[in-house]
Image (cartoon, rainbow, N blue to C red):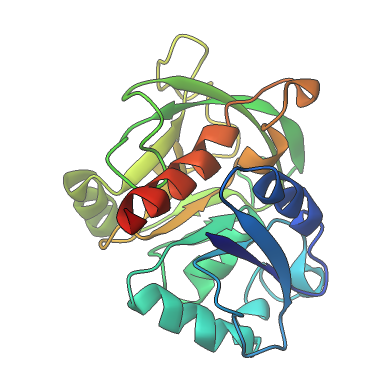
């Protein structure tokens, strides 16, 4: 199982993701420069957090034109896993691999804190090691995490079970007060219809060791590796 972590100018969570992936059993990981067109036999691609191209224009709007994105899209169309975290989520939306868009936080402030989110679906390759309805703790750090989509798209995603994580309070209640950025339907993470592309604003790679205050993010990466091992048997 090989993780390929795409590095854009301005990525700053690439080595955090690399560290977690390299610590997993039966896995290896390497960084892929955004100008490359070679995925180097990666099984899973990660678009990490950061500020690609300085977030000038719109977040992710320039990065989606990087040469490697053609290969990322080809990889996704083949049904192979792609995970976008924070800025990576924004890039996936800009590239059309996920519906909707990430807008400025509703209060116009950058947020950096730990939040709670609820597992809405555990029938995906990313969330198989979680319990349905489980409440997780992960950090967020963004100024543009306000997820927006048309009412029709939101309704369709709800019906299809594409909304994977929602912001909630510590009791698992999905309330306005628990929504840190104004996201529609408290959305913190979604998948595409084919369920092989996940975008999420919270950072699982920063919640993968007890030293960081939470290990709730590690099971997301473990879910991906275990699925690959089962497929290979």
**205 is higher (above) or lower (below) than 139:** below
- In the current view of this chain or complex, which residue is farthest to the front? 233
For the point 40% across and 73% down, which residue is it? 76
Instruction: Classify residue 215 by image quadrant.
Output: top right
For the point 82% across and 74% down, which residue is it? 9
Q: Is residue 132 left or right of residue 31?
A: left
Instruction: Classify residue 171 by image quadrant.
Output: top left
For the point 33% across and 32% down, which residue is it? 120
Q: How many marks?
A: 0
Q: Is residue 198 visible?
A: yes
For the point 57% across and 82% down, which residue is it? 69
Q: Where in the figure is residue 65, as x and y percent of width and height?
A: 62, 87
Q: Where in the figure is residue 222, as x and y percent of width and height?
A: 51, 40
Q: Where in the figure is residue 154, as x and y percent of width and height?
A: 29, 51
Q: Is residue 219 left or right of residue 134?
A: right
**97 is higher (above) or lower (below) than 193:** below
Return the residue nearer the eye: 40 or 220: 40
Return the residue nearer the eye: 205 or 52: 205
- In the current view of this chain or complex, which residue is farthest to the top? 171
Return the residue nearer the eye: 85 or 223: 223
Q: Is residue 203 visible?
A: no
Instruction: Classify residue 75 by image quadrant.
Output: bottom left
Q: Where in the figure is residue 14, as x and y percent of width and height?
A: 76, 58
Q: Is residue 201 left or right of residue 111?
A: left
Q: Is residue 96 left or right of residue 42?
A: left
């Amino acid at each position: 199982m090989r993780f390929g972590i795409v590095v854009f100018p301005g990525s700053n969570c690439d080595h955090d993701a690399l560290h977690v992936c390299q610590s997993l059993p039966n896995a290896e990981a390497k960084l892929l420069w955004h100008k490359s067109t070679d995925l180097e036999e990666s099984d899973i691609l990660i678009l990490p957090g950061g500020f690609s191209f300085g977030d000038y224009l719109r977040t992710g709007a320039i990065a989606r034109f990087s040469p490697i994105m053609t290969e990322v899209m080809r990889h996704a169309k083949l049904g192979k896993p792609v995970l976008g975290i924070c800025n990576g989520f924004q890039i996936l939306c800009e590239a059309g691999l996920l519906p909707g868009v990430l807008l400025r936080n509703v209060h116009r402030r950058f947020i950096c804190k730990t939040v709670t989110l609820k597992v809405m679906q555990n029938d995906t390759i990313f969330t198989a090691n979680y319990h349905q309805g489980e409440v997780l703790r992960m950090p967020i750090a963004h100024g543009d995490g306000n997820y927006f989509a048309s009412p029709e798209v939101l309704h369709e995603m709800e019906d299809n079970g594409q909304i994977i994580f929602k912001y909630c309070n510590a009791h698992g209640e999905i309330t306005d007060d628990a929504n840190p950025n104004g996201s529609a339907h408290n959305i913190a993470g979604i998948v595409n219809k084919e369920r092989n592309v996940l975008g999420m604003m919270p950072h699982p790679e920063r919640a993968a060791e007890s030293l960081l205050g939470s290990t709730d993010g590690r099971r997301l990466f473990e879910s991906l590796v275990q699925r690959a091992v089962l497929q290979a048997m």
